[in-house]
Amino acid sequence: MSLQRADSIDARKRAARMQSWFERVRHANLPMRFSGGAPPCDARIGRFCQWNDDDTTVSKEPKPIKEARDKLLRTLDSAANRSPRDEWIIGQRVRYLVEAGRDSDAVKVARSCEATRWWCEALTGLALHELEDYAASDTAFREALKAMPDGERCRWTDMSPLLDDSQRKRFGKVGCGRNEALAERLWWLADPFLAIPGNERQTEHYARHVMNRILDGTRDGFSVQWRDDLRELVVRYGWSRYWSRCARKLYGSIRRARIGT
């Protein structure tokens, strides 16, 4: 094994250990949320109970979490210098910059990406979407879709999971190489502001797929193993934007999901 290869492997291992450490720190310092109890599930997805409510109160993030995230980002920056083509490392850098609200920095990091072309374009699309530059995000995602492997493109463009049972029965598979005209029309109808360049609903959908790939195989605020139920939650409802604890249950919001038993 070459020294360069060994150095890249070591950089990834160190970054992964630091990422796990940060999520343990986050979990140990989450703010407490007080409520009168959780309402019935609006959707039951695997291990999770998801519900929609109007409570979007965001607790102030504790200082130890912010400081730990900054330390993690410094470690990831160092790892990227040692292994600039590592897709996992660049993905985690963008993830935690977005989480910290540093969207402009996330765009800069994504645009400096030296990994696989389609992954770099996808990360750029995610960062630009978070920056609310939807036209540029749309362009980046189009380039990513052109360059990505067929199987990945199929997952991203398949709209069937977004349809209800009657629509799936009527239209069958939509997107992913079938009923493409209908898929294009559905995205056009979903665009909330036709006069404004870019389709933020569509870029949001693709951003969720990017974040799903970033999160897969990592620790997160739920501190549970990443499985298909979490993948479905992210694609259907988005990823968690902040965290809190309540009566031994862990909440992830704005997409709020509760670990079930």
Image (tube, rainbow, N blue to C red):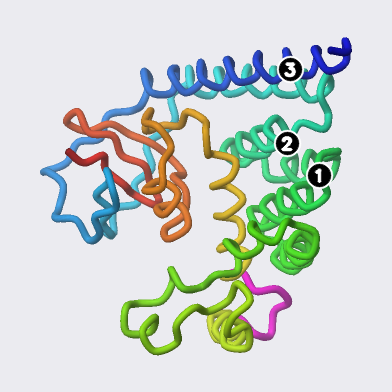
Query: Mark on residue 87?
Result: 2
Q: In x, y percent, where is residue 236? A: 43, 60
- Disc 3: which residue: 9
Within the image, what quadrant is residue 215 found in?
top right
Q: In x, y percent, where is residue 163? A: 41, 76
Query: Quadrant where the N terminus lies?
Result: top right
Residue 29 relative to residue 148: left or right = left
- Vertical side of 168 occupied by 24: above or below: above
Question: How far apart are the alpha carbons under marks 1 and 3?
Answer: 17 Å
Ranked by sequence position, the earlier of labels 1 and 2 is 2
Q: Nearer the viewer, residue 258 or 232?
A: 232
Q: Magenta segment range?
A: 192-200
Q: Residues within 10 Å of mark 1 (few under 14, many from 20)?
A: few
Which three-letter amino acid code belongs to the residue tagged 1?
A: Thr
Tag 3's secondary structure? Answer: helix
Do the numbered discs 1 and 2 sit on residues whose CB atoms are within 8 Å? yes
Question: How far apart are the alpha carbons under marks 2 and 3?
Answer: 12 Å
**Residue at 28% across / 31% down in the picture?**
245
Within the image, what quadrant is residue 84 found in?
top right
Tag 2's secondary structure? Answer: helix
**Residue at 88% across / 13% down in the picture?**
2
- Judged by its main secondary structure, the magenta piece is loop
Q: Residues within 10 Å of mark 2 (few under 14, many from 20)?
A: some
Query: Mark on residue 116?
Result: 1
Residue 209 relative to residue 103: left or right = left
Mark nearer the viewer, 2 or 3: 3
Q: In x, y percent, where is residue 19? A: 56, 22
Ranked by sequence position, the earlier of labels 1 and 3 is 3
Ranked by sequence position, the earlier of labels 2 and 3 is 3
